[in-house]
């Protein structure tokens, strides 16, 4: 029996059971996602008014620059931010991408 | 598919450039080949690269069509995300037990549309980008992956079920389990490839802790159009570097690291990257600190001379130490050999360690083949027939037998196919 | 049946695909704009872009579009057709279309790479080139590949280690092999070595293990003293002519002739260090073991054998073979410095590394002291990169006008291997090693360098534009020669090293193969070595189908690399010939019999034998002459097309009408 063949109710049950089996992974990853979401929210806020560079965002949200870059590049990969030219020839500016209306 | 027993003429282990070439050369002669690849996609290290020396062809221009040729060859069957568990002798042939890891995605129905990936809430460091960039816990491994099928990383999954709801063809299967496959073949080619020497191996070079000290493979990803930033910027703070230095033999020719040999490729890839950076960052100063420049292949010396003519600075010197200043700029302490061994310190924006090659896998246990002290497969006849092993019917090719560049790997792979074909014929005529 | 007029383009549904080529094209050409423009074209059903069309994902898009949108023509703008036209034909065929309903437009080599400074112009050019491709695609007709029987028989040229390896591997696949060797003996350059790195094995023992496998293989025929003199035909069906010389002596009188011969010449096996008779064996234990007469040097005078005067006669014979594929394994020769360079050929104490290896091999057990021309040797200098890594503007080109700017790859390790062996035997000798970069690359080689350092070899580093000089020492000096130069390991200090012997680590140059190059129309690189099609995609193949390269004819290589290349060449031959059939593109001349009037103008300009002939046939009750093409012999060059006064002949897939349509499209008024 594969997952797709289950009823909606069974799917919910299976996921619940699997979450229990993988409790440690799920807990660790959920904590990670939560932290990620907080940082992403902060980054969005920082970019709300105007485009900024990674060091600028880092100062605003009080995170190390390499962490900020990782998040910004992740957001860029999934079309949540985009490049917006350069500042002082060496720093890339990033801007928010308007979320598509569903 | 409930096929747990397969039969073929040849089994090729490893779907990098060497394994693919061996498989193609055998399949094109009419032999049935099974190609087993540990990762979710074939392509190996080469598909990660930007452009390749000395022609500066984009790596994917060479690799992706080869991957496609393998996938479309009617005589080749790919078992991706699968690992060899054991090998038994079976007359003059072999029986391989293969573990097919669960993708948690139904291979037969997944279309590679990536809707699951977009739905997934978990961003993790992307192994394809050497963890520099990000990827989702469920994803198509990379844009040109073969097979073009998603894989779910259960170790980083919160089991929220979003991907399953997003999948238009109901391909997500959380209940998938690993499968054992038994493969009966007459001959076997080991093409398990290489790993780069770890970036944190040398404490004098910052122990891997300095964000703007990267290795050559990471620079490949930065230079690749599909890379984590799609441009060359510092992983430490996203700044475009104006001064980049290469430290050669950072992980080769170094007894203290247990890698006393020369890794063959590092001089050429450093020069190549330097030329590519000079193209994308025309204002940047590029320095290469080296002991000996070893551009020995066809067309390689001219490549080196071109790089010198482009203004890339070659400094014969030993880099003793790399530290960091308050702006995350790496500082090298270098002994200038051509200048009476005086020691100077120089600050760059970014350092690339030209790391070397070590074997990815030691096949001695599972395959019973002899390996050298480093774990590279050792041929009893290294000159006349370098792909032979001490086990009749088992051949080894590419970087599993020692450091080599792509050109040499491809020839070695064709040579292994040739030896395997001769073995197949001799076994059959003997019967 | 041939149609009388050009068919009106059917209702074509064209799929157009423009490739980013991972940035190679899209960095210059506005690929999205090109695709957008294509969508306006009335015949275009769909136009798409992709990061890399040649990837499996990219190809799948085309396949699906053919099936789902009912496309009947495909045009792809990407790299050069030479790279991936074949790939995309396969894609189109898998989609269910005739593979020749596809046209490949080169947007990389012909556009983005050459116009990188003019993105706007490059984009316009891309649009025009794509329009031209569409115009041609409209007129394409279905074609089938030409299938030909292939002779399961390979010819290997060269009996050195690469040729032997290739021959054995091809035969191992069940394919007949004829191996021809120019000289009277097998073994090539490897036979002249003593021990080989990295094993330390005796070179001739290793070699003979392979020679024995080759000579006893039932599918291999060996012809020594033989050369290719003529070649005709095409892949799978080459007609080759081989000329053999006789050995001059036979089993009956061979030993006696060898004993009786008195004429001596410099021994090329020992690079002229010794002399040998003109009736000779290359070395003890060589194969074939029957001696041979050195026809080049034999003075033609009678030799007295068993009381009879005998004059040796070179009975040449030629024979023909039908061959499916050819392996060129003609090998290298050591670079010979011009007289006076580093004192070579002027100072008796200057030798090349190959000569020195022969010198070491020739010693007869006297291990107490190394001598050179009767004098004891205590101090030796080795100089690297002699004949290699030459710099434009610093070094003179060779007499053929070519600058040896390449690295010869093997000399560093070979030199240090030889030096280490020397020091094992004579630990008291001092060795000075003058180098620019030590290139002991790879797994086993670096240890030769570290070992040499441990053995107290003194390394001195020169700069490529300031190489050392070798001069005679002043009268009464302790040593006969001085090596002078700057040592950049000690801040460019001027050094003057007195030595007893200088070893020049000479590079490799290919054996002269101009006759083969001319006969086979295969290309040489700027470095004179034979040139492969592509170092990664087709690393041992020449552009001429069915002709492949093995070993140092292609570039400097060590024995391992030569054997790998040879085995790779064997694999390609096996791929070509295993099925007993080869397939060729159908781009050949095609006669419209309704227009042909049998003028024979096409035959007059045709450069390929038997490609077109006039045949008698009956048309409307009358016997007439008409041109008939044998597709396998036709190269598709198009000479005949321009010569025909009645426009009755055309090249399939590349018709005159196609070109006209393409030119019209390229020059069309376009709003960009």
Image (cartoon, coloured by chain):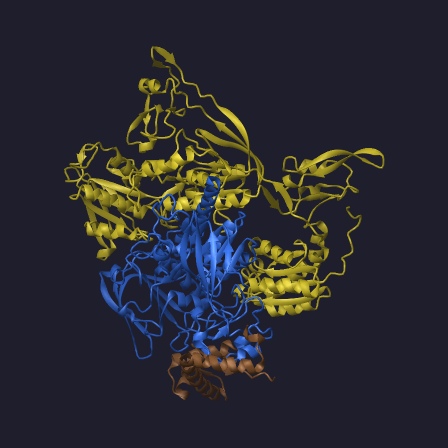
Chain colours: A brown, B blue, C yellow
Name which residue lies at 39% across and 47% down: B392
Query: Which residue is outermost to the right?
Result: C621
Quarter of the image where the C terminus of chain C is located = bottom right
- Does residue C442 sit above or below C256 in this rendering? below
- Does residue C230 sit above or below C567 in this rendering? above
Residue B387 shows up from this direction: yes
Quarter-of-image position of residue B110:
bottom right
Asked if residue B364 lies left or right of residue C472, the reply is right
Query: Which residue is outermost to the top?
Result: C307
- Does residue B308 sit above or below C315 in this rendering? below
A69 or C121, nearer to the observer: A69
**Residue B60 placement (x, y as % from top left):** 50, 61
Name which residue lies at 43% across and 65% down: B220
C455 or C531, nearer to the observer: C455
Name which residue lies at 54% across and 48% down: B30
Residue C329 shows up from this direction: no
**Residue B269 placement (x, y as % from top left):** 40, 60
Asked if residue B29 lies left or right of residue A27, the reply is right
**Residue B80 placement (x, y as % from top left):** 49, 63
Quarter-of-image position of residue B337:
bottom left
Asked if residue C255 lies left or right of residue C626, the reply is left
Q: How many marks?
A: 0
**Residue C491 placement (x, y as % from top left):** 23, 58
């Amino acid at each position: 029996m594969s997952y797709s063949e289950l009823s909606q109710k069974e799917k919910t049950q299976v996921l619940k059971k699997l979450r229990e089996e993988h409790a440690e992974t799920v807990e660790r990853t959920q904590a990670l996602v939560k932290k990620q979401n907080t940082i992403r929210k902060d980054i969005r806020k920082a970019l709300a008014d105007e485009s900024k560079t990674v060091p600028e965002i880092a100062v605003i949200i009080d995170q190390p620059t390499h962490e900020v870059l990782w998040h910004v590049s992740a957001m860029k990969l999934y079309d949540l931010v985009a490049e917006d030219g350069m500042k002082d020839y060496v720093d890339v500016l990033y801007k928010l991408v308007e979320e598509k209306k569903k | 598919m409930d096929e747990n027993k397969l039969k073929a003429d040849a089994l090729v282990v490893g779907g990098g450039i060497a394994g693919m070439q061996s498989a193609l050369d055998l399949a094109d002669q009419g032999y049935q080949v099974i190609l087993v690849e540990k990762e979710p996609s074939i392509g190996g290290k080469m598909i990660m690269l930007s452009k390749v020396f000395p022609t500066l062809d984009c790596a994917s221009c060479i690799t992706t069509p080869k991957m496609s040729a393998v996938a479309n060859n009617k005589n080749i069957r790919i078992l991706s995300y699968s690992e060899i568990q054991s090998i038994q002798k079976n007359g003059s042939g072999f029986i391989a037990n293969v573990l097919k890891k669960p993708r948690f995605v139904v291979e037969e129905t997944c279309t590679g549309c990536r809707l699951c990936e977009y739905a997934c809430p978990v961003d993790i460091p992307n192994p394809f980008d050497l963890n520099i960039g990000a990827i989702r816990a469920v994803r198509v491994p990379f844009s040109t992956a073969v097979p073009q099928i998603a894989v779910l990383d259960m170790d980083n999954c919160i089991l929220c079920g979003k991907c399953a709801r997003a999948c238009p063809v109901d391909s997500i299967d959380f209940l998938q389990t690993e499968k054992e496959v038994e493969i009966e073949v007459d001959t076997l080619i080991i093409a398990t490839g290489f790993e780069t020497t770890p970036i944190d191996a040398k404490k004098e070079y910052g122990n891997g802790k300095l964000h703007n000290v990267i290795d050559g493979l990471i620079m490949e990803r930065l230079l690749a159009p599909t890379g984590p930033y799609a441009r060359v910027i510092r992983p430490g703070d996203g700044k475009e570097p104006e001064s980049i230095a290469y430290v050669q033999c950072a992980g080769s020719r170094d007894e203290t690291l247990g890698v006393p040999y020369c890794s063959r490729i590092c001089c050429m890839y450093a020069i190549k990257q330097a030329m590519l950076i000079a193209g994308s960052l025309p204002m940047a100063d590029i320095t290469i600190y080296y002991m000996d420049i070893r551009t020995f292949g066809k067309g390689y010396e001219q490549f080196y001379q071109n790089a010198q003519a482009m203004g890339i600075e070659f400094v014969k010197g030993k880099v003793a130490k790399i530290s960091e200043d308050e702006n995350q700029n790496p500082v090298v302490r270098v002994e200038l050999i051509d200048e009476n061994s005086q020691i100077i310190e120089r600050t760059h924006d970014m350092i690339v360690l030209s790391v070397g090659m070590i074997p990815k896998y030691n096949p001695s246990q599972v395959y019973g083949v002899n390996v050298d002290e480093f774990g590279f497969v050792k041929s009893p006849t290294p000159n006349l027939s370098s792909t032979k092993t001490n086990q009749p019917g088992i051949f080894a090719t590419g970087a599993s037998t020692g450091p080599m560049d792509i050109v040499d790997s491809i020839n070695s792979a064709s040579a292994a196919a040739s030896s395997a074909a001769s073995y197949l014929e001799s076994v059959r005529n003997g019967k | 049946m041939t149609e009388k007029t050009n068919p009106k383009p059917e209702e074509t549904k064209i799929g157009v695909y423009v490739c980013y080529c991972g940035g190679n094209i899209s960095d210059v050409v506005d690929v999205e704009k090109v695709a957008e423009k294509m969508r306006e074209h009335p015949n275009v059903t769909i136009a798409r872009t992709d990061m890399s069309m040649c990837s499996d994902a990219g190809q799948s898009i085309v396949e699906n579009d053919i099936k789902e949108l009912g496309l009947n023509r495909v045009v792809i703008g990407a790299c050069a057709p030479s790279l991936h036209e074949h790939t995309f034909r396969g894609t189109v065929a898998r989609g269910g279309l005739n593979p020749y309903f596809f046209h490949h437009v080169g947007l990389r080599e012909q556009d983005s790479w050459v116009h990188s400074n003019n993105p706007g112009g490059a984009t316009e050019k891309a649009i025009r080139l794509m329009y031209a491709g569409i115009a041609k695609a409209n007129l394409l007709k279905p074609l089938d590949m030409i299938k030909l029987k292939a002779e399961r028989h390979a010819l290997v040229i060269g009996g050195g280690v690469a040729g032997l390896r290739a021959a054995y591997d091809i035969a191992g696949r069940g394919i007949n092999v004829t191996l021809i060797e120019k000289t009277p003996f097998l073994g090539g350059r490897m036979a002249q070595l003593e021990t080989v790195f990295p094993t330390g094995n005796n070179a001739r023992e290793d070699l003979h293990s392979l020679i024995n496998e080759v000579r006893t293989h039932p599918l291999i025929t060996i012809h020594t003293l033989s050369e290719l003199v003529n070649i005709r035909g095409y892949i799978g069906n080459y007609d080759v002519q081989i000329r053999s010389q006789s050995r001059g002596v036979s089993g009956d009188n061979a030993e006696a002739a060898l004993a009786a011969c008195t004429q001596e010449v410099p021994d090329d096996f020992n690079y002229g260090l010794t002399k040998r008779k003109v009736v000779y064996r290359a070395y003890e234990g060589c194969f074939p073991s029957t001696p041979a007469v050195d026809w080049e040097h034999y003075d033609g005078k009678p030799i007295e054998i068993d009381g009879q005067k005998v004059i040796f006669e070179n009975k040449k014979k030629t024979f023909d073979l039908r061959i499916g594929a050819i392996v060129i394994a003609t090998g290298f020769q050591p670079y010979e410095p011009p007289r006076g360079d580093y004192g070579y050929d002027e100072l008796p104490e200057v030798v090349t590394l190959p000569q020195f290896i022969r010198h070491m091999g020739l010693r007869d057990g006297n291990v107490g002291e190394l001598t050179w021309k009767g004098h004891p040797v205590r101090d030796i200098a080795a100089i690297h990169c002699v004949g290699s890594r030459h710099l434009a503007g610093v070094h003179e080109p060779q007499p053929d006008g070519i600058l040896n700017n390449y690295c010869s790859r093997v000399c560093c390790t070979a030199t240090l291997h030889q030096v280490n062996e020397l020091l094992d035997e004579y630990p008291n000798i001092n060795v000075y090693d003058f180098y620019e970069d030590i290139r002991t690359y790879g797994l086993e080689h670096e240890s030769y360098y570290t070992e040499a350092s441990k053995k107290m070899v003194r390394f001195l580093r020169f700069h490529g534009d300031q190489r050392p000089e070798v001069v005679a020492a002043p009268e009464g000096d302790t040593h006969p020669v001085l090596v002078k130069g700057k040592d950049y390991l000690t801040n460019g200090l001027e050094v003057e090293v007195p030595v007893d012997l200088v070893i020049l680590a000479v590079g490799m140059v290919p054996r002269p193969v101009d006759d083969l190059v001319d006969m086979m129309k295969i290309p040489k690189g700027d470095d004179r070595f034979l040139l492969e099609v592509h170092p990664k995609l087709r690393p041992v193949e020449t552009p001429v189908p069915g002709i492949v390269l093995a070993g140092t004819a292609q570039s400097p290589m060590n024995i391992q690399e030569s054997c790998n290349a040879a085995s790779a060449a064997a694999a390609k031959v096996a791929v070509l010939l295993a099925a007993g059939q080869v397939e060729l593109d159908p781009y050949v001349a095609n006669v419209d019999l309704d227009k042909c009037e049998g003028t024979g103008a096409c035959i007059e300009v045709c450069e390929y034998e038997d490609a077109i002939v006039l045949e008698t046939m009956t048309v409307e009750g009358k016997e007439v002459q008409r041109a008939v093409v044998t597709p396998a012999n036709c190269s598709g060059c198009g000479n005949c097309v321009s010569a025909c006064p009645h426009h009755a002949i055309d090249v399939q897939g590349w018709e005159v009408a196609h070109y006209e349509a393409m030119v019209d499209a390229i020059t069309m008024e376009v709003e960009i």
